[in-house]
Image (cartoon, grey):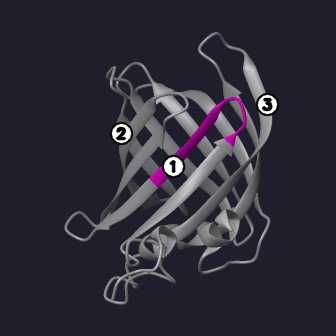
Amino acid sequence: MIASSFLDALLADGPAPDLAERMGLYAFLVGSWTMHATVHGDDGAAHRGIGEVHASWVLAGRALQDVWILPGLFHGTTLRIYDSALDAWHILWHDPLKQYYARQTGRARDGGIVQTGWTDTGEAVRWSFAEMTPDSFRWLGERSRDSGRTWGLQADFRVRRVTARAARPLAEACA
């Protein structure tokens, strides 16, 4: 069957049936959210703002994609793909506004989710979801300049759901 539009080809109503049991780690993200963000610059300045997050199942339910928008700081998208051989998630973040791209591996840890990876300059990064409830979570972005011995906070987002869980929130946002 040929999809009638790009959104119909991209969006899915839920996880692929053959992977549904393993795809639950990031399922909580599906929907629309608002965030209160604090981002720490390399110069030590704290930038505060209010942004939004939208997430949906995509690619026949074999991945989850989200869009994170913090006006003036970033406007990017994450593609999260489960790898059954690793029992982990490949995380691909793209921010064309800042020309920043990151590849990480995500796994459940201590009641939350931790994504780890390296920047192009060799710095370790750790992005974590914590304090998760059905309608809120905290997202922390950290960087290490000494291969993970010490960590510095780069971002702290307090996120709250603004819409009920929906199968296709991105389609609604684009309508």
Q: Earlier in the sequence, mark 1 or mark 3?
A: 3
Name the amino acid type tagged 1.
Thr
Q: Earlier in the sequence, mark 2 or mark 3?
A: 3
Any magenta on residue 118?
Answer: no
1 and 3 marks in contact (CB < 8 Å)? no
Highlighted range, magenta: 70-78
Question: What residue is at 33 percent from the left and 89 percent from the top?
Answer: 1
User: Badge 2 is on which residue?
Assistant: 117
Question: What residue is at 77 percent from the left and 71 percent from the top?
Answer: 163
Q: Position of residue 4 (x, y in %)?
A: 46, 80
Q: Is residue 68 left or right of residue 123?
A: right
Label 3 SS: strand
In the depicted structure, whether residue 115 falls above or below residue 161? above
| Residue at mark 2 to residue at mark 3: CA–CA distance | 25 Å
Q: Is residue 72 left or right of residue 105?
A: right
Q: Nearer the viewer, residue 132 or 42?
A: 42
Q: Which mark is residue 77?
A: 1
Name the amino acid type tagged 2.
Gly
User: Badge 3 is on which residue?
Assistant: 48
| Residue at mark 2 to residue at mark 1: CA–CA distance | 17 Å
